[in-house]
Amino acid sequence: MIFQQALVGTSGSNVKLHNLRAILLTLLRHQNISRVRLAELTGLSTTTITNLTAELVAQGMVAEMGTEHPHRRRGVGRPRRALQLVPGAGHALGVHIGVGSLRITLTDLLARPLTMHAIAHELDRSPREVLDAALNSVNAIVAESGIAPETIVGVGVGASGLVDPLNGVNVLAPNLGWRDVPIRQWVAERLPYPVCVDNNVRAMALAEALFGQGQGVAALAFVYARVGVGAGLVLGDQLYHGAGAGAGEIGHTTILNHGDECRCGNRGCLETLVSEPALVAQARALAAKAPDGDLAHALHATPNDRMAAIFAAAAQGDAATRAMLADRARYMGIALANLVNVLNPDLIVMGGLFAQGREWLLPATEATLRKCAFANMGQRARLTTTTFGRDVGAIGAATLALSAFFYQQIDSMAH
Ligand SMILES: [Zn+2]
């Protein structure tokens, strides 16, 4: 079965394609619903629903699974047969480009990973070499998976820094030294699937909105801190890109007027205070003052994962480490309070360091956010960490492809 062709080839009209996508999207959001309810939610006639769902069932994309959940039914009468999306009927590929690391996944239609590959990349390698390594891995994953390549609905790439999603170009990635890298073109040259490219934190935000804790949330912010710091904003189920696709660059908001110089050229950016390099520099200074302390020992014992060492020292009760992390977390709290004042989100989901070390970073972040945000907005915004863990970037990238497949055409991104 070839979905792209099945959907387009049998439609004969854009209206039918649009209706099919509306049905799939509604089934994505409401698992287990009847045809009658599907008609209500999509605004399509029951005849249209009956005909189109019959096609989707025949394609294996949708299945009848028991009866509709009782609370979704109104009135009395015999139970209605429920329809469900078949998660394994289609697949998406996700490529997360981090600073020094790639994570690549193959997922089902609900963005659940079937495989997850992690590859390190040296920062002196060219963008082309990094992309080639990623695409070699993608081809290997597809070959090993045994799935029919025709079931792959698309490939999503989450890139670092400023990304133009319309043209699929990584305009600027200061932490990689990349400029104007035509990612979509390079991927399309080697893979026969539709390609979506966006900023990697924006992709994570979309994953939380569609498949994670942000389902049904009106305004969601995903904040990620690792080597860089950024945010993705999802408003009313749509990624918010801003005029120049730069919305969410929270890492480069100025926190200290005369602070350290940032890679962006500005001084005192949030990123210079709460990113991994910033925390490691703080920790090294602390360890130098107490060479026999828990922190110095932890950094020595785990040289390849310095953040894990820092959090381990905090877990062992090292007071100076805990104080340093809480102090840094307050800067993030200030940035989140500013974000809340502008966006008034229902939910802020944090990933990267703030998920890995949530026990040591989140309390001070949250307290500062609650204290500094205007009126009661800081109280209303729920603050949590991603449940996707370290896979959030790759799952996010796959979500870009799934989102495009289900409904969001890239040309609707300009809000
Ligand atoms: Zn900056």
Image (cartoon, rainbow, N blue to C red):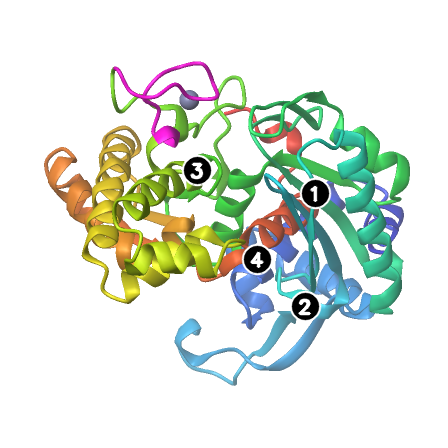
Q: Which residue is mark 3?
A: 277
Residue 166, percent across and down?
Answer: 67, 25
> Mark 3 belongs to which amino acid?
Pro
Q: Estimate the x, y position of residue 14 in percent, counting from the top left.
A: 76, 39
The amino acid sitting under disc 1 is: His
Q: Element under label 1? A: loop
Q: Which mark is residue 391?
A: 4
Distance of mark 4 from mark 2, alpha carbons?
Answer: 19 Å
Of pointers 1 and 4, the one earlier in the residue sequence:
1
Question: Which numbered disc, 4 or 2, marks the residue that appears first in the sequence?
Answer: 2
Q: Nearer the viewer, residue 32 or 224?
A: 224
Q: Which residue is mark 2?
A: 87
The first of marks 4 and 3 along the sequence is 3
Q: Are marks 1 and 2 in contact (CB under 8 Å)?
A: no
Instruction: Determine whether the residue tagged by mark 4 lies in a helix, strand or loop.
Output: helix
Task: Please tell me whether the stretch drawn in magenta is mainly helix, strand or loop.
Answer: loop
Marks 4 and 3: CB-CB under 8 Å? Answer: no
Mark sitting earlier along the chain (1/3): 1
> If the picture is divided into quarters, which one holds ligand 1?
top left
Of residues 298 and 279, the one nearer the viewer is 298
Q: Residues within 10 Å of mark 2 (few under 14, many from 20)?
A: some
Residue 214, can we see it?
Answer: no
Asked if the residue at tag 2 contacts the one at tag 4, i.e. Cβ–Cβ closer than 8 Å, the answer is: no
User: Which residue: 26% across, 52% down?
Assistant: 321
Q: Tell me the residue at 53%/57% (across/down).
A: 390
In magenta segment, residue 297: no
Furthest-front residue in view?
292
| Rendering coords of residue 275 (x, y %) | 40, 38
Quadrant of the frame with the N terminus? bottom right
Give the residue number, with chain letter if any, for mark 1: 121
The mark closer to the camera, 1 or 4, is 1
Contact, mark 1 vs mark 3 (Cβ under 8 Å): no
